[in-house]
Amino acid sequence: MVSIAGNAADTAPLGRQRAEAAAAQERPFGPRFMTPMLMGATLNPINSSVIATALVSIAVALRIPMGQTSILISSLYLTSAAAQPAAGRLSEEFGPRRVFLAGAATVLVAGIVGGLARNLTALVVARVLIGLGTSAGYPTAMTLIRGGADAAGTGVPGGVLGGLSIAGAVTAALGLPVGGLLVGWAGWRSVFVINVPVAVIGIVATLIWVPADRPSAAARSQSLTRALDPAGIALFAGTVTALLVFLNDLRHPAWWLIAVIIALGSALLAWERRAELPFLDVRALGRNKPLQRTYLRNFLTLLAGYCVLYGFSQWMEQSRRLSPTTVGLILLPMTAIGAVASFAVARRNLIRWPLVWTGLSVIAGGLLLLLVSSHSSILLLTGLSFVFGLSALGQVANQSALYQQSAADEIAVASGLLRTSGYIGTVFSSSVIAVSFGQSATDSGLHALAWVFTGLGILVTFTVLLDRTIPGTAAPATPAAAVGTGTRPEAPGPASPATEP
C-alpha cells in the first residue's frame, strides 16, 4: 500500500516537471523578442509570392509585354538565394541584431523605391533591394534564437522554431490571397509600399525588445576584408546565380552555363579550402553528411511545394477558369493546415515521422491530382488543398534537423544555405511547370505535373527512410558558446555528434 502511494506520489511530480520543463524552454523567447524575429522571417517568402497577383496590372500600367514582368519574380529569387548565407556570415562578424536592422532599413528603402517607380528598371531595383533586405531576417533570427537557447540552457526551442518555420513556409502560400486583396484594394504599387510600415515596425520592435549585440572581437583583431571573405561570397553568388539562371528555363536551356557553373564552383571550392576564415567552410560541410541530406530534402520538398503552389493555381485560373480571388480562397486551407500541423510537430520536437508524412502527403497529392479535370468541383479542389498543406511538415522538420546538425558558431550561414536550397527548388519548379504545361495549363499538362509531383514524393520518402542518422525527436542540445558575439573560433573544435566521419 505504501509502495502504491509512493509510486503515485512520484508520478504526479514527474508530470509537473515535464510541463514546467516545456514551459521553461520557451521563456527566453517571449512575444516581445519573437515579434521582430517572426516579422523578419516572414518578409522574404511573402514578398516572393505576393508579386504574382500584381504582374498583369504592372504590365498594363507600364505598357510593357506581360512576359517582361517575370523578371520581378526571378530577380528576388536570384538575389535571395545568394544573399541568405552572406547575411548569415555578416551576422557572425557584426552581430545578428545589427544585420537584422540593416536588412529592415533596406526593405524600407525598397518599398519607397517600388512605390514611386515609373518604369520596369526601377521596379527591378526595388525587388533586388527587397531580396537583399529580407535575406537578413531568417539567418539572423536563427542565430539570435540559438544564442538565447544556449545561454539559457533550454535545448531545442521547438515551439519557437515552429513559429519561425510557419512564418517562413506557410506565409509564402498566404502571399497569393494577400496580394490579390492588396491589388484589388489599392493597386499594384501596394505590394511594394506595404513593406514600408512593416519594416518600420520591425526596426522599432528590434531596437526596443532585442538585446544589443556584443562587441565584435574579430573586427578588432583582423582586417574586415579578411574576416568577411568577399572573394568567397562573390564566387558563391556567381555559382548560385548561374545555376538558377540555367534551371529557370529548361525549355530553352543555355547549355554554356554548365561550363560557367563548373568553373565558378571549382574556383569556390579551391578558394574556400585555402581561406583562413572561409565564408563557406567546405571541409566541415563535406564531413557533415546528415546536413547535406537535409539540404537535399529541403530542395525536394520546396520543389514539390512550389510546383503545386504555382502550377495548381495557374491551372485553376486557365483551365478551370476560376478568378484569382477564388483560387486564393481555395488555397487558404493549405496555409491553415500547414500552420497547425507544423506548430504541433515543432512543439514536440519531432523530426523523422513528419518527414515521412511529408513524402507520403506529396505522393497522395500527386495521385489525387490525376483524378482532377476542368470539370472537377471546387469542393474536390479545396480537399486537395488540405492534402498539400501537410507538405509544410517537411520544412519545420528539416529546420529542426539543421538546428541539431549545425554547430552554434555555424548556424547563421547554415540557415542561410537551407533557404538557398529551397530557392533552388523554387526556381527549378518554374521550369518543371513550363515543361509540363507547354503553351497552356491544360488537364493533360496538370496530369503530367501530377506524375512529377508523385515522383518527388517518392524521392522525399526514400531519402528519409534510408537515412538512419535522422532522429525521431530533437535531443536536448548541450549549451554551446554564445552566438552573436562577433567572434569565430580560432581552430575547429570537435566534430558534431551528427557529423559522419
Image (cartoon, grey):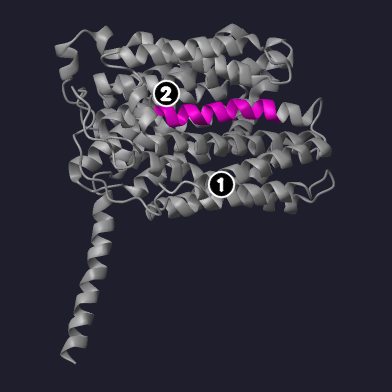
**Image quarter of residue 33:** top left
In the image, taking residue 250 as reference, residue 262 lies left or right, namely left
In the image, taking residue 88 as reference, residue 113 lies left or right, namely right
Tag 2 near tag 1, CB within 8 Å: no
The x, y position of residue 199, in whole percent, is 40, 25
Q: Which residue is mark 2?
A: 84
Secondary structure beneath dot 1 equals helix
Dot 1 amino acid type: Phe
The x, y position of residue 175, in whole percent, is 57, 34
Per the rendering, the mark at residue 462 is 1
Give the dominant element type of the magenta stretch: helix, strand or loop.
helix
* Region in magenta: 416-432
Quarter of the image with the N terminus in it: bottom left
Q: Residue at x 23, y 69 (%)?
A: 14
Closer to viewer: mark 2 or mark 1:
1
Q: Is residue 111 visible?
A: no
The stretch drawn in magenta includes residue 182: no
The x, y position of residue 315, in whole percent, is 76, 36
Mark 2–mark 1 Cα distance, whole angstroms, equals 28 Å
Dot 2 amino acid type: Gln
User: Quick check: 256 above or below 167?
Assistant: above
Q: Is residue 15 visible?
A: yes
Report the front residue among 150 and 29: 150
Q: Residue at x 17, y 25 (%)?
A: 214
The stretch drawn in magenta includes residue 429: yes
For the residue carrying disc 2, how many other residues have a C-alpha within 10 Å: few (<14), some (14-19), or many (20+)?
Answer: many
The x, y position of residue 115, in whole percent, is 53, 16
In the image, taking residue 175 as reference, residue 100 lies left or right, namely left
